[in-house]
Image (cartoon, grey):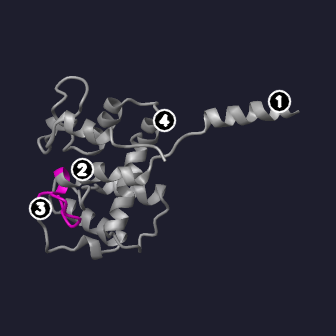
Amino acid sequence: MSICLFVLYAYDMNTKRLSVDTATYSPLMNLIGEIESNDNYNAYYGKPENTDIQFTNMSVAEVMKWQEEFVASGSPSSAVGRYQIINTTLAGLVHELSINTNQTFNKNMQDRMAIALFERRGSVAYVNKELTAEEFAANLAQEWAALPKVIGDNPDSSYYANDGLNSSRTKPETILGVVNQLSAE
């Protein structure tokens, strides 16, 4: 009986997935914040320097309504906040994270959403060595247009370079250097 328990324990230890040490997300958050919004939690598409509209004082529901109206008025993008979260992504995060839309779209909320997007794009798989740094960086480039593709044709260019709106604002070695700082708890 004790051999059986040891085998089960060993199996459990070998299959236990590591989680990301949340403190190690900071360099990635800072890089994305810098290149997407000039580190402005109140930025919106075309206005990284915005100080007039205070998204950080709005509820998530108010931000979603603003995004809808902004696109309806002719904007090609609904991106808001430090991480330039578009309306469809925001709606998905609200559902995925069970966010009460009366909560404020403040710095903590935006950071929480960014971490959820990192996880969606493979940060946990990366620290568990199921993705290479290049693969994880390429996944991130599909979320944030200012990041380079890292792999494939034109690795220095944005995944969305052909849309006429976006371009990479950093180099593959920069994002890889930041990704390599992620570690497990």
Rounded to the nearest angstrom, the CA distance separating label 4 from label 2 is: 23 Å
Magenta-colored span = 35-47
Q: Which residue is mark 2?
A: 32
Foreground: disc 2 or disc 1: 1
Looking at marks 4 and 3 on the same chain, the residue that comes earlier in the sequence is marked by: 3
Q: Which residue is mark 1?
A: 3
Label number found at residue 128: 4
Residue type (three-letter) at the residue carrying disc 4: Asn
Report the residue at 28% width, 50% height from top: 27
Rounded to the nearest angstrom, the CA distance separating label 4 from label 1 is: 28 Å
Helix or strand or loop: what does disc 3 sit on? loop
Residue 163, image x, y percentages: 16, 39
Foreground: disc 2 or disc 3: 2
Pick the residue in front: 119 or 93: 119
Helix or strand or loop: what does disc 4 sit on? loop
Foreground: disc 1 or disc 3: 1
